[in-house]
Every structure is written in structure tokens, then in C-alpha cells.
Amino acid sequence: MLTYTIRRLILAVPTLLFISLVIFLIVKLSPSDPTAGLPLTIPPEVREQIRQSLGVNDPVFVQYFKWLKLMVWNEPLHLIESWTGWQVGPEGPRIISYQTRSPVMDLIMQRMPQTLWVVGTSYIVGILIAVPIGVISAYRQYSIFDQVGTFISMLGFSVPTFFTGVLFIVIFAVQLGWFPSVYDTTHVVTDWDSFVVQLKQIIMPVMVLGLYNASQISRFMRASMLDNLNQDYVRTARAKGLTEKVVVLVHVLRNSMIPVVTVIALNVPSVFGGAIITEQVFKVNGIGQLLIIAIQGGDIPVVQTVSFIFAILIVLFNLLADVLYGVLDPRIRYD
Amino acid sequence: MPDGGLASVLDVKDLKTVFRTRRGEVHAVNNVTFHLEAGELLGVVGESGSGKSVTMMSLIGLLPQPPAEIRGGTVRFEGKDLLACTEEELRAVRGARIGFVFQDPMTSLNPVFPVGFQIVEPLRKHMKLSKSKARDRAVELLELVGIPDARRRLDDYPHQFSGGMRQRVMIAIALACDPQVLIADEPTTALDVTIQAQILELIKELRHKLGMAIVWITHDLGVIAGIADRVMVMYGGQVVEQGPVKELFANPKHPYTRMLLETVPSVRGDRVERLRVIQGQPPILAQDPDSCPFRPRCPFAFERCARQNPPRLPVGPGHDAACFWNVDTGAPRDV
């Protein structure tokens, strides 16, 4: 397993290099000028000097390798420095956002907690709702519970989050006034009251995303349970005189979780990326919103960096899913 | 009445199981009556779909209800009527007093748990053994069924065993709590011939060692001839003939049994004739339970067979057949 993991990690390097090249080139293709957002009073020769200093006049491949070096060497060291306080951050340039003129990695690090809180919570809530629903739906197939569950998950799965988000705002924020429609990221939890405020503002985005995630995962869970409930080993377990609880929650569930855990792991990167729209709807200033603002402002370094980080996450969680598969299913051994 | 001897450990009377399907009711088990004496090996023969397995599954509540429904009958076992028992009481019988071995050892074991865990489960549940005691007993059981190096193999997963070895594990599970009755549902069908012979030897040996009664379901007449004390032939959801093994093979009284025995190719002597077959198709069990199920394929069928389902008539000592036709005299029986 260890050698397999190491081999996969080494194989990930060329994959990621290729992805980085594609991302860099595609974003580079878009006609945008890093000085476009600056005041019109700036004379053309000064603009030209700004472009020169940002390096956008260099050949594309020179730009790519400069960016790549910053991305894989300088920025990680800066990250380590900011986390640990060790003086390892190298001298020299960093990847700078055109819009804000601050290092891209700092922007991402500022945005990350909001995204993790809101989207991560919704993912966990989604899983916690989906697994029991999937199990019961499969065990009582075609019962009222199953029918209602199937209906709701079809709905949750097919209605986009920008619709449910706005719908929830209209109902719960505007009509009923229960929850705020805007997520205030500057809010700090210090005591019970501020915790309640935090809870209130996080409920709606978590519900919107949680519904979507739960719908998807509960369908997988149900299908996987149904596959396993008819297996011979279930009959064996019953013939041993085990209670239904043990038969279903030990024997069947353990087998059914194998594909579901894989799906859950594979979807983790979308926790970071997929919430772009929901963050926009609820004004959560997380990674998704950062990406949208960067795209709108032609902020090429931010777009490139955030996209590349998504790519890294996808590759890593693919690997994690494969490893988990091997851990959960004793029949699969990679060595 | 040929059935219901004094020493019988299992006494089944008029068992009736139907399956409810979209196309109406299927009479899978139709007034089946039989008994099992202490320490005897009863062979149950019949082609696929004759109701052999369903009968055995019915009496211990292993059939999913719905679609199955047990319509009537009694199953006396250790002073109780199993059909009147609660699920709780049945669980105390299953795996403890009545053990099961199923057909396909490749799928009958749970792939994600070590075999030790699967053997220990019934021991912990029914015999309330401590963890270490149960493990010791599991080792004992594996040694009993002839698995070498038993203690080390406890932590192996089912896929690390061959088909024959897995079936031995299944037998170990079935024998875990010293059952009074072992129901073996085509335990050798999925195995190749040499392994089949080994398993047969094992069962013969264990039977004498442990003194339990065995119900051996099969469609292989050769296997039955080798190990059974008594044979019960099933066709179309009912028992058509029953008797001591030698008597029944030498002197079959039911046209179906007779034709079934003729279909067995002989390896001795010259090959002179083509293999005999029974013309026609086995019944789809949805038929009318009030006529003889073998009638459409029976060369001796006459008018009464369509009107009345023949009861089991005594034809010799401990031997009965459900047929109005006397195959020896070539005339209808006078009943």
C-alpha cells in the first residue's frame, strides 16, 4: 500500500505539471491587460513600464517557468513561514494579484477559513443526513419513506443551488426574517449569543449546499445498499441468528460504504470549487468568490493559482479515494 | 401415516408457502410433510425450482416476507412450533440449534470481514463466549473441518481461501454452536468434483463425530446415493416420493422418480443408448395446486390426475409415493 501510494504520488508530478501548463496557457490566451484597471490618467509609457515590471512582455514560456517556480517553491515556503514562524520564506518576487497588488497566496489564505467553515460544514451535514437516509430507503425499498426520500433527493439533485439559495433567502430571510441573507465573515464567536448569530447566518448556506450533497450521496448509498442486501452473505448472516440491526449495520453497511466513501472522497475538491455559486449568493467571501472576482477583473495570476490549487486537490483526493478503497475492501491490494 | 416417527427431531406438517407476484400467487411449497430423525441424513432431491430450498428456508423464517408468505402448517422442533415463534425466538434457533450451509461458498461469506470474525459471531451471540474463548473455539472448529494452520488463518479474509476451503469455513460456522440439525443447501454444487468428494467425506465424518441430523439438498442423485439414509424427492413444490435410500433407488414407485433415475448416465458397461431425458418442461409453480404437478409430463397420467392432487400413499415399509398409478401392476391404485 505504501509503495503504491508513493508511486502514485510520483506519477502525480507529471500530471500536475501538464495541468499547470494547460491552465497557464488557457488563461494566458484571454485578452486582458493587467493595467486595464488603473486610472486612465496614467500615461502610456508608465503603463508600459508597469507591464514590463510585471513581466507580461516576456515570452509566454519564460512567464510560465517563472510562475511555476514561484508556485511550487517560493509560495509553499512562504506558506510554511506564515504557519510556523520559521524564517524560510525566500527573498524575491511572489505571485502578485493584479487587482489588489498583494500576494495571491495571502489572499487565498484569508479566504480559506470561510470556505472551509461554510462549505465543509455543509458537506459533513450532507453526509450525516445522506447515510441514514440511504440505508433506510434501501432497507425499506418502495416504502413511503423511500418514496419521499427519493422524491426529495431527485429535487435536491436536479434543482441548482443558485435557485434553492435564492428561494431560501426569499422565504427565510425576506418573508419570515429568521436568518440573515448575507454571511458576515467578520463575525467572531466569543460567547453564547454570538454563537447563536453565527449559527443563524450559517444555516442557510449549509442547508442549500447540504441538500445538494445529501441528495447525491443518499442516492449512492441507497443503490449500494440495495446491491448488497440481496447478496448471499446477508442470508448467511441471518442464518447465523444475528439480529437485523447487526445484519444491516455491520454486514451490509460495511460493504455498501466502499463505493460511497470513494464518492465522498472524490467530491471533496468540489467542496472548494463547487461552492462558487453558493458563496456568491450568500456573499460568503471565500475561495469561490475570490475566483469569480478575479475572473471578472482579469486578474490572471489569481485565476491561474486558484485553478491550479483545485487541480492539486483533485489529483490528491483521487489518490486518497483509491487508497481508501484498498483500506476498506480487503480484496483490493495494490502491492 | 409414514411420517412422524417417535425419535424425530424435526417434524414438518402441511407446510404451505406461496410467493405473491404481479402475475398471481406462486405455490412454491405445497403441503409438504416430512420428518427428520435424530442423527439421520435425509437427502432432498429435485430439479431446480422444485421447492427444495424454499421449503427449508420457510421453516426457519429465512424467506423474505413479502413476497413470500407462509400459509399454513406446523414445524415441530425441540418442543416448539417454529412457524408460531416470534422473530426473536427464531433467531435463537437459527445458527444455534439449526445450522445452515449454502450453495455458493464464493459469495456466502462476507468479503470484508476475516473468517475468524464470521465464525466468532454466532459463538458470541448464542453461547455468550468471551472474545478469547470464542477465538479458541473458532480454531477448534477450523481444525475440525480440516483447515490446516487454523489459528493463523483466523485473520485471513474469505478471498484468501479456495472454494473448497471456503465451504469448510461455512461448515465451521454452521457447526459453531453444536446444532441439532444441519441444513445443507446444495453445498457441493459449486465445487469441482474432487473437492466435492472431500466435502462429502468431511460431512460423513462429522456426522458420526457430532451425531447431528442432516438435511442434504441436492439435484445430484449420485451424491445422495452415497451419503443419505433416506431420500425425499420433490417436484413442483411438493414431495412426490419418500423412502429409505436403497429401497427408493432400487424400487422407485413414482413415475417421476423412475424417470429421474433413468436420466443418470452410467459409467459402467457399454454405451448402447442415448441418454434418456424427461420430456417437457418443469412446472412453473404458479399452477393449480389441486392437480398432480407431474401430470403434463407423465406417461401414465389419466383423468383422475387432473381432478385431484394425489396424496402420499404408502407403497412399502417407510416408503410412500404421491401417485394414483401403480407402476408395478400398470393399473390405477385403488384409493
Image: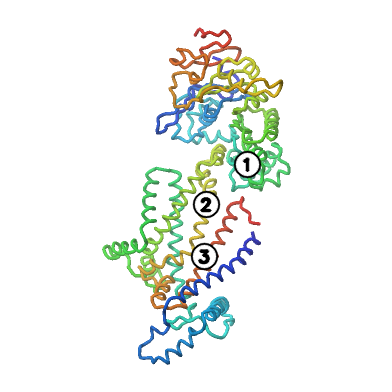
Q: Quadrant of residue B192?
A: top right
Please, which chain is the residue tagged with disc 2 on? A
Give whichever of B85, B99 is nearer the camera. Answer: B99
Q: Which class describes the residues within 10 Å of circle 1: few (<14), some (14-19), or many (20+)? A: many
The chain to which mark 3 is attached is: A
Kindly state the secondary structure of the residue where label 3 is placed. Answer: helix
Residue type, mark 3 in image: Ile
Residue hosting label 2: A257
Secondary structure of residue under mark 1: helix
For the N terminus of chain B, give its image quadrant.
top right
Nearest to viewer (mark 3 / mark 2): 3
Residue hosting label 3: A314
Looking at the image, is B244 positioned above or below residue A196? Answer: above
At x 51% / y 12%, what residue is drawn?
B324
How many marks do you count on the picture? 3
User: In the image, residue A209 lies at what x, y percent?
Assistant: 40, 61
Residue A172 x/y as whole percent = 30, 62
Please, what is the three-letter code of the amino acid marked with disc 2?
Met
Q: Which residue is mark 1?
A: B119
A166 to the left or right of B190: left
Marked residue chain, label 1: B
